[in-house]
Image (tube, rainbow, N blue to C red):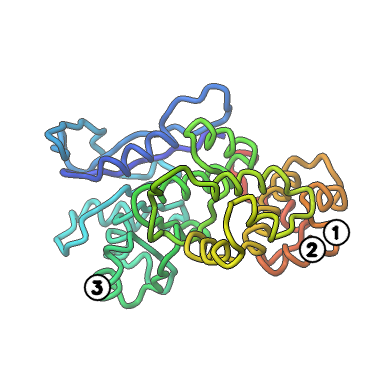
């Protein structure tokens, strides 16, 4: 079934995060059926004034009842009175059990409503201390790309919203379609929420052998990968290589490989064309016992349970 999405904006809204939400959920993709139907909406009658002198004319709404998912792509981090109509609409939407997602500073709006009390949440690292001081009842999670549990999702700053969006698409329509969307955006489809949102040196002085080594490893997941050979591919000493993994992913190289193999295995399980033993071999776990161990340790479910859970959670397949 089609999933109706509202992207909520306001005067001087966050254009980049708004654009990410529209690109992910509002761009027509007739090759995927069903898909999302997305509208940019506001509780303030337009036109709205946006950064850079732009003018935006979103759909003026008084209710969110017609939508299945609402995305808040940024909001003010400063305390301000909330429009009572907006407050009531968002609380009614949340209490109806529908999906509510924030990108970057959008978490401030959800927290202001009390929706995040007792729940895990995150936002851009620049706002972390302000957020924690204003909303002590929220379990703030530092240094992650996003958190996504049940019907609530929060991403860290700016581009991390794309990572959360790809994860939403994966849960709704499966691994293969999420990968296709990621490829068309020319981004990675394998960044998980628990990765670090802050990299000390995000722009390298020259072309990175490290990124090429990652690509090589992903192409070899079915085979045994020796970490020393992995480091040699990156043209780094083992010590430098280990430090690079920690600073970039907050994981060891071995842990990163396990996460990549789990991603590959999940895609194969969702496709449903191989036995558990075959999936274990193709994903590089060697055998089903090893794969079950890592599924339970990292994901909290067995491979068989994952297949059943994914099918039952996918709105697109219901």
Between disc 3 and disc 1, the foreground one is 1
Q: Quadrant of the C terminus?
A: top right
Near mark 3 (Cα within 10 A), the count class, few <14, some 14-19 or many ≥20, is: some
Q: Is residue 170 left or right of residue 115?
A: right
Mark 2 lies on a secondary structure that is helix
Q: CA distance from mark 3 to mark 1?
A: 47 Å
Compare marks 2 and 3 and give the one earlier in the sequence.
3
Secondary structure of the residue carrying tag 3 is helix
Q: Which mark is residue 292?
A: 2
**Residue at point 75%, 47% (across, down):** 269
Which disc is residue 288 wearing?
Answer: 1
> Residue at (46%, 52%) from the top-left corner?
98
Residue at point 38%, 67% (across, down): 116
Q: Position of residue 289 (x, y in %)?
A: 85, 64
Q: Which mark is residue 134?
A: 3
Dot 3 and dot 1 residues touching (CB under 8 Å):
no
Position of residue 216 in the picture relative to residue 72 (left or right): right
- Residue 70 in picture, x, y percent from top left: 38, 46
């Amino acid at each position: 079934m089609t999933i109706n999405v509202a992207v909520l904006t306001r005067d001087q809204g966050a254009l980049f995060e708004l654009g990410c939400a529209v690109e992910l959920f509002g761009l027509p993709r007739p090759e995927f059926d069903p898909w999302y139907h997305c509208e940019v909406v506001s509780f303030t009658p337009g036109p709205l004034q946006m950064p850079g002198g732009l003018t935006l004319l979103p759909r003026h709404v008084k209710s969110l009842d017609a939508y299945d998912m609402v995305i808040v792509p940024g909001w003010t981090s400063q305390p301000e009175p909330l429009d009572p109509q907006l407050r009531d609409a968002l609380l009614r939407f949340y209490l109806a059990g529908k999906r509510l997602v924030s990108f970057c500073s959008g978490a401030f709006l959800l927290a202001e409503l009390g929706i995040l009390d007792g729940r895990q949440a995150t936002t851009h690292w620049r706002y972390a201390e302000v957020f924690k001081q204003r909303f002590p009842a929220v379990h703030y999670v530092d240094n992650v790309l996003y958190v996504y549990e049940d019907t609530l999702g929060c991403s860290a700053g700016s581009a991390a919203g794309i990572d959360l969006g790809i994860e939403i698409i994966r849960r709704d329509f499966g691994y293969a379609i999420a990968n296709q969307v990621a490829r068309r955006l020319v981004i990675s489809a394998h960044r998980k929420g628990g990765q670090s949102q802050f990299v000390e040196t995000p722009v390298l002085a020259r072309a990175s052998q490290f990124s090429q080594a990652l690509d090589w490893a992903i192409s070899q997941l079915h085979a045994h990968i020796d970490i020393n050979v992995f480091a040699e591919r990156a043209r780094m000493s083992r010590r430098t290589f280990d430090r690079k993994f920690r600073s970039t992913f907050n994981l060891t190289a071995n842990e990163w490989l396990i996460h990549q193999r789990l991603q590959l295995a999940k895609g194969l399980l969702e496709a449903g064309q191989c036995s558990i033993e075959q999936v274990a071999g193709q994903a590089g776990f060697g055998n089903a016992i090893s794969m079950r161990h890592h599924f339970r340790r990292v994901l909290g479910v067995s491979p068989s349970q994952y297949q059943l859970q994914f099918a039952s959670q996918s709105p697109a397949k219901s």
